[in-house]
Image (cartoon, rainbow, N blue to C red):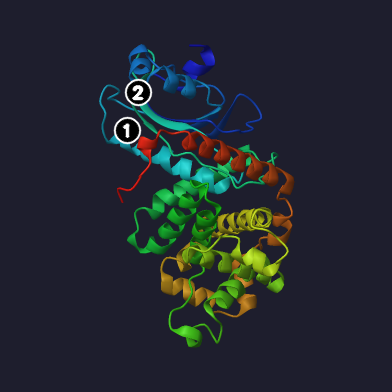
């Protein structure tokens, strides 16, 4: 192991290591995110022979081919014992993984693993390992979107906030919003992705119950668009927000996800409507990310958003007051313009070609795989 690698895990330290197949720019071979948290392009620990045999050659090779490693360390007097210190490190690494997915729109993670280990006086050893769920991007994500040093440092700040929030039972709605956002990032189904993203936004902008009286004469969709638009600087983006809410409704009722895109432009076929729908999902992800980060990173908002009633009280204020307390707005229309339509079309074409290939394989299956007359 070279000098740089051995310096990352000192003797008598325990560690948790995220091995991520993701693109990142560290402005060097490694980046100190915090005193005990480092990002590297190369693995800081070699897999011992017995772990290579346990994981299998393919898994071990996939770990070693990862291009982003996040290493969390702590000093210990018991390097040979798996105990609560390991659990703390594992929890910290897991929260950072969630936080970087929130902080970076360019975080596409095709493969990942979390490993826990320790170093006594000899080489670091791996004690436990578990796979991570991949994170997929919406078709049309610009190739220029990659993880940056600023996003990694923001993720560290968010992870510390998440750690603190975990001690409070009151933040249940905010945690549900975070889980909805997390679920959106793990699915390739764009209709379900948008559905979860709108749920994440609603986790921050709750719709009061009690019909139009509770929402000042507005329907639920109108209330959602009116209040969410305050995060975007005003009414200019309400049509886009209404389209997001309506498309979420299509998914809820098992209709084609592009139903409302076609309703707005009947000249589009279902296939042609996929690209503008993907742009809607892209914009929704940007807004959901903005909403969650703003609440988590703003102490005054966290205090007000500790309960659903506090959220409803916040959004019930005068619009100018809401915008002032919310802070810098999210340029939703400008963000949507960064969507790469040509790349999205290529993604959809590849998807259709792959589905056709799979159908052709299935069509060649023996008759014994078919149901026949038994049903």
- Decide: few, some or many residues near mark 2? Use Cα within 10 Å; few <14, some 14-19, many ≥20: many
- Residue 26 visible in the snapshot: yes
The one nearer the camera, 116 or 228, is: 228
Q: Which residue is mark 1?
A: 86
Per the image, label 1 sits on a secondary structure element best described as helix
| Residue shown at 27% from the left, 25% from the top | 78
- Decide: few, some or many residues near mark 1? Use Cα within 10 Å; few <14, some 14-19, many ≥20: many
Q: Which residue is mark 2?
A: 118
Identity of the residue furthest to the front in this view: 373
| Residue shown at 74% from the left, 57% from the top | 334
Q: Is residue 83 above or below residue 219?
A: above
- Residue 68 is situated, as x and y percent measured from the top left of the image, at 54, 29
What whole-number distance in Å separates the C-alpha atoms at marks 2 and 1? 9 Å
Per the image, label 2 sits on a secondary structure element best described as strand
| Residue shown at 50% from the left, 34% from the top | 361
Q: Is residue 103 left or right of residue 56?
A: right
- Residue 142 is situated, as x and y percent measured from the top left of the image, at 69, 43
The one nearer the camera, 175 or 54, is: 54
- Residue 331 visible in the snapshot: no
Q: Which mark is residue 169?
A: none
Earlier along the polypeptide chain: callout 2 or callout 1? 1
Marks 2 & 1, CB-CB < 8 Å contact: yes
- Residue 73 is situated, as x and y percent measured from the top left of the image, at 42, 30
Q: Is residue 242 above or below residue 209?
A: above
| Residue shown at 47% from the left, 40% from the top | 97
């Amino acid at each position: 192991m070279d000098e740089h690698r051995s310096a990352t895990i000192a003797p008598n330290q325990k560690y948790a290591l995220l091995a991520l197949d993701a693109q990142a720019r560290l402005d060097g071979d490694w980046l100190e995110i915090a005193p005990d948290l480092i990002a590297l392009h190369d693995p800081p620990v070699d897999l011992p022979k017995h772990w290579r045999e346990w994981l299998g050659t393919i898994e071990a090779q996939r770990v070693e081919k990862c291009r982003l490693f996040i290493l969390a360390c702590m000093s210990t007097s018991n390097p040979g014992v798996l105990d609560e210190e390991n659990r703390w490190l594992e929890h910290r690494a897991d929260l950072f993984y969630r936080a970087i997915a929130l902080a970076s729109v360019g975080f596409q993670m095709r493969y990942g693993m979390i490993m826990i280990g320790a170093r006594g006086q000899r080489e670091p050893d791996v004690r436990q390992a578990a796979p991570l769920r991949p994170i997929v991007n919406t078709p049309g994500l610009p190739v220029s979107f990659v993880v940056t040093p600023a996003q990694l440092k923001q993720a560290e700040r968010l992870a510390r906030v998440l750690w603190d929030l975990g001690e409070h039972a009151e933040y249940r709605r905010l945690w549900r919003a975070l889980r909805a956002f997390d679920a959106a990032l793990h699915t390739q189904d764009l209709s379900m992705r948008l559905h979860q993203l709108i749920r994440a936004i609603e986790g921050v902008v709750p719709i009061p119950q009690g019909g139009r009286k509770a929402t000042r004469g507005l329907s639920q969709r109108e209330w959602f668009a009116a209040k969410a638009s305050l995060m975007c600087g005003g009414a200019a983006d309400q049509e886009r927000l209404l389209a997001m809410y309506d498309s979420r409704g299509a998914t809820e009722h098992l209709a084609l996800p592009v139903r409302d895109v076609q309703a707005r432009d009947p000249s589009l076929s279902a296939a042609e409507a996929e690209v503008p729908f993907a742009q809607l999902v892209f914009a929704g992800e940007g807004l959901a990310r903005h909403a969650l980060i703003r609440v988590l990173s703003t102490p005054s908002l966290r205090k007000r958003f500790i309960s659903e009633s506090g959220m409803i009280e916040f959004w019930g204020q005068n619009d100018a007051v809401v915008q002032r307390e919310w802070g810098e707005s999210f340029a939703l229309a400008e963000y949507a313009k960064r969507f790469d339509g040509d790349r999205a079309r290529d993604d959809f074409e590849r998807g259709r070609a792959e589905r056709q290939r799979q159908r052709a394989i299935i069509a060649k299956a023996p008759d014994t795989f078919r149901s026949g007359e038994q049903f």
